[in-house]
Amino acid sequence: MAINNELFKGTLQTIILNLLSENGRMYGYEMTQKVKGLTQGELVLKEGALYPALHKLEAEGLLETSTEIVDNRIRKYYTLSEPGQKEVLSKLAEAREFIQQLQAILNLKPAL
Amino acid sequence: MELTEEQKAEIRDYIVDVPRYRETYDELYDHILNALLELPGSYHLNEVIAIINQDFGSFSEIVIQEEIYQKTLTRKYIKMFRTEMWNTFKWPGILGNLSLLALCWFIFRADVSRVQGIRFILVGMGAVVILIALWGYAHVFIRKRRYSKRSILDNFLLYQTGFGLTLLNAFLQLFISKYALFPLRDDFRYGITLLVVCFCFIYMQVMVKFFKQKLKILGTA
């Protein structure tokens, strides 16, 4: 069953920050493929949402960027900045708390 | 799928007029090529159109997002620039500023005609400011020629250079020129001119430092 992307909108920044925390530096397309792989294709990060989120995090100073020439084209890599490394911890704690609350409200049981 | 150079050129031609800035263009082009390389089958431009529509919404959506990106990034640069300026008034940057002030004080106390002194300083300062402005414009021009698109940082460089020149011109028109809006006594004019010289030097020093750092990060210097 494909997951409704709307459910992930509020956690997109957390997903990005966590991906970068675990993988060091990544470029946009690589992130979409990583998420697709981790969720067995159930969650597709639409770049129309990904790039604006990346740019917002960059402007907020949570991400740093660098460019590299790969196969004769410029590739933009994102890494966590120092404030970004701190932010990822609080975002993860926030997400954990949210999932616990959701669990309490919806009383979800694992699917058989 | 593997792409030939002709096919890559076709993709570049197809998207080149959409984004205004190099940052967006590079990211869009890299994304499309990465997506195509993972697709099975043979190349057709329709695949590119499909990737753009599926992944980015549409060309107009790309333009809207780019506008937002440009604004937020420019705001960030302005904030960083202000912080750099402010840092020159903190230790150890303050040492340079104090030396400049001391130098201005000695010039102020020197036994020279105020009118002559102002003229001399304004000519010197004008030359330095124009040189720095030319440095900025040359940077933008060369990079535009090299990459065919302007970067958001270039935009900021033009803004910052223009802002500095406007500020200087306003000061001249308000206090120093023959038809100044607020004519001052020669002593005052001389003192204020020297203070503006200090500010100009700090401003230019920060500007060159800031852009050298940013260009190094962007890897496009």
Image (spheres, coloured by chain):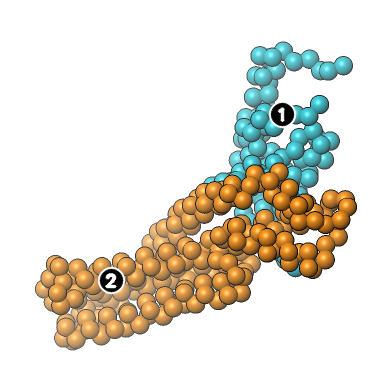
Chain colours: A cyan, B orange
Q: Is residue A82 above or below residue A45?
A: below
- Residue indicated by mark 1: A4
Rendered image quadrant of residue B124: bottom left
Quadrant where the image shows the N terminus of chain A: top right
Res. A37 mark: none
**Residue B96 in the figure: left or right of residue B104:** right
Distance from label 1 to label 2 (Cα)? 57 Å
Classify B129 as above or below B7.
below
Which quadrant would residue A109 be assigned to in this image? top right
Q: Is residue A24 left or right of residue A88?
A: right
What amino acid type is highlighted by mark number 2?
Asn
Three-letter amino acid code of the residue under disc 1: Asn
Q: Position of residue B71 (x, y in %)?
A: 48, 52
Looking at the image, is mark 1 or mark 2 nearer the viewer? 1
Q: Residues within 10 Å of mark 2 (few under 14, many from 20)?
A: few
Residue B155 x/y as whole percent: 48, 63
Please, what secondary structure does the residue beneath circle 1 have?
loop
* SS at badge 2: helix
**Chain holding disc 1:** A
Residue B2 sits above or below residue A112 on the image: below
Q: Chain of mark 2?
A: B
Q: Residues within 10 Å of mark 1 (few under 14, many from 20)?
A: few
- Dot label at residue B169: 2
The residue drawn where x is 55% and y is 64% is B151
Q: Which residue is nearer to you in this view: A14 or B202?
A: A14
> Where residue A61 sits in the image (x, y, percent)?
55, 49
Q: Residue sitting at 65 percent across and 19 percent down?
A: A101
Percent x, y of residue B125 = 32, 79
